[in-house]
Image (cartoon, coloured by chain):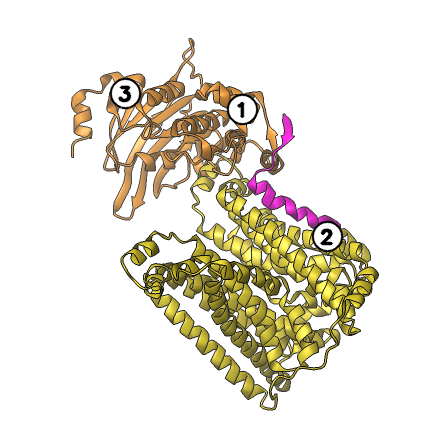
Amino acid sequence: MTSLLTLHQVRLAGPHGDRLSSITFELQNRERVALLGRSGSGKSSLIAVINGSLSPDDGRVLFRGSALQGLSRRQRALIGTLWQDLRLIEELSIGQNVNAGALGRRRLPWALANLLFRIDSESTRRCLRLAGLEESLLAESGLDRPVGQLSGGQRQRVALARLFLQQADLMLADEPLASLDPSIAAEVLNRLLARDSDGALLSGAKAVVVSLHRPELIDRFDRVLGLRQGALVIDAPADEVSARDLSELYAP
Amino acid sequence: MIHQLRPSAPALALLPALALLPVLVVVLVGAHGGGVEIWVSFLAGAFQPSLEPSLIRALLGALQITLATALTGWGCSLLLGVLLGCLSSERLWLTWRLPSWPATMLRRLLALPRSVHELIWGLLLLQVLGLHPWVAVAAITIPYASLVARVWRDQLQSLDPSGLEAMLQAGATPMAACLTALSPAMGAVLMTYGGYRLECALRSATLLGVFGLGGLGMDLELSLKSLRFHELWTGLWLLAVVSIVLEQLLRSWRRRSVQAQFGQRQVVWFSLLAVLAAGVGALWLQHLFPDAGPLRWLPVTWPNPDSLLQAAQELPWLSMVWETLLLTLLAAGIAIGLPPLVLLVSPTRIWQLCLSGLWALARLMPPPLTVLLLLLSNHPTLAIGALALGLHNSGVMGRLLQEGLDQQDPSVRTALLSSGASDQVSWLYGLLSPRSPSHLAYGAYRSDVILRETVVVGLIGGSGLGWQLLESLSSFHWSAVVLLIATYAALTLLGEWLSDRSRQHWLQS
């Protein structure tokens, strides 16, 4: 069976040496992966290589067996990212920002209509609910609020709802908890990782990769990838990763 | 499901382009077959400009007049504008422990010269002073000085007064306190806004030439009217070279002004430069027109109340004002909406480069010449004027939009591209969206400029107050001239007020 994602001998050069070197792993459906490592270890670079915003200097990245660079727009839309800086569009409303998640499946006329009208679909609200946005903001007038007026936690939820609306098979999250207080962080993580009784992710994704700087959260994941100076030094089921492995990973 | 119209900032940046539809329909319906041949020879002229030595000599002579006029007008307006700006700042009067009402009075008084376009000033002064090289200089200096005064005064008023107050408390003299506390921040204003006004002065000097006040504009107009397109293009390319050199100089100047740390030095250097420009320009004009002699007032019969009343009853107010406002709306729509619309067609680097060339050409071509060119293949309509004015201002808006987009953080666009959005959509959401509030804010300012400029195309295109003004000036109907200028001033002041409010809204959003 074809893996959802395959990285083979991936190298990404940087101004002061390789940012990633010889990264090789495969990702299967239903996997929830924690990507760990110190700051500057290459986590964000790896996420950017997987979503195609950075091209590796060597090696191959395959999504469902096809090279990433050759993917069509619709196939590309099957890889979604929750960016560390969220990358919301400040000039647009909550509804318009969430709808931007569908831009990979839509054409220019729809994109223009989203800027001109309130396109209020049930899926927009469902994704916002799934992301945990409070009911008051789900009212018609709430969806028209510019995202610039929202708190940090609310903005995180709008970005999460946009990711859910993208209906990606592979969801990537780059340090999604970095600027959140612990209670909101735990809730955001739950919403990304929650499964139904059949074991499928509630977000609709087939697999999820979350980069973290808090190793105490790995028990919520199935698998751990550990990066150190751009190299993959841990690739193991989460329950097999020991405290010693983690302390070595984070050692100065 | 689509519920309600809720246009966002990027949609509002694109929607004004709808003004192109009625304009193009009228222009295309009104076009006649003979025009195609004329347009082909006009475009062919761009690639085969005349290189006849006598023509180039004549054009270089005319260019010197334009440059000397622009330089003198710019230097004088900057010096006068800064002085008037200081005098109309209530803060400075209060610093000297004087009542501030003279500043308020002066500020209100300056609204009048500001509201009248330099072309109207030129035509008026031509009537009362006759043809003289300093007429064009005065026509540029009067409105420009009032514009500089307004910007200078607004900046002075908006500065944090705490530093100034602290120095006064510490016993510093008002002059020393102002120079120390206020001038550092004013240096950058002078560098950026003053530089921008030099570009405007070159455009205005060319434009005044088109209406007979001498210089390159006059030669361009004569070449166009006699359908000598090869000669026309020689002049246009010459103007293009000067404009591009000036733009590049000003760009590096602005870049240096951002890096500069000592605003006081900038103020001093810039003031010296303005004095030098005015002096060099004046000597240059003297050299070009050694027999010009001093300015003399020609006899003018000023209108009395009875003749004013009679003129007021004769003039077709409703149609004039309506046409002027419609011309402004259509031209502003084209100027604001066209640049983002054509960039959206293909947001690739090569297309952007092509458009940069087109914007430069649009800025270069004085709107009256575009009107004349369009009239070679069309009937005179309001749409022709709107198209010419809209295209010219698109050149200014397009360049600024492109510069802004080049400086825009590409991270949102990268994110959208990685999620499968197309090039166009990722450009629309990732680059145009963040840029659209400032584009709209500048569009509001530009609409105000366009309202002033309607007189320029109205004079030729046969529409609005401009047309009526030309008729009245030609027949020395001074009562009508006074009323028309007063109406223009009232309209532009109203436009200025609306534009200020709209600009503030977009800059705060």
Q: Is residue B464 left or right of residue B360?
A: right
Position of the N terminus of chain B by quadrant: top right
What letter labels the chain drawn in yellow?
Answer: B
Which chain is home to disc 2?
A: B
Between the C-alphas of marks 3 and 1, the distance is 30 Å
Q: Which mark is residue A124?
A: 1
* Residue drawn 72% across the image and 52% down it: B326
Say which quarter of the image contains residue A218: top left
Which x, y percent locates residue B491? 67, 56
What letter labels the chain drawn in orange?
Answer: A
Which x, y percent locates residue B176? 32, 65
Mark 3 lies on a secondary structure that is helix
* Residue drawn 58% across the image and 62% down it: B109
User: Height in image: B367 above or below B17?
Assistant: below
* Residue drawn 57% across the image and 63% down it: B110
Which chain is home to disc 3?
A: A
Q: Which mark is residue B326?
A: 2
- Main SS of residues in magenta: helix
Q: Is B255 within the magenta?
A: no
Check disc 1 and give the amino acid type.
Answer: Thr
Which x, y percent locates residue A65? 43, 29
Question: Mark 2 and mark 3, same subunit?
Answer: no
Check disc 2 and give the amino acid type.
Answer: Leu
Check disc 3 and give the amino acid type.
Answer: Ile
Q: Which mark is residue B263?
A: none
Mark 2 lies on a secondary structure that is helix
Local packing at callout 2 (Cα closer than 10 Å; few below 14, some 14-19, many 20+) is some
Query: Residue under circle 3?
Result: A218
Name the N-terminal-most of marks 3 and 1. Answer: 1
Magenta range: B1-22
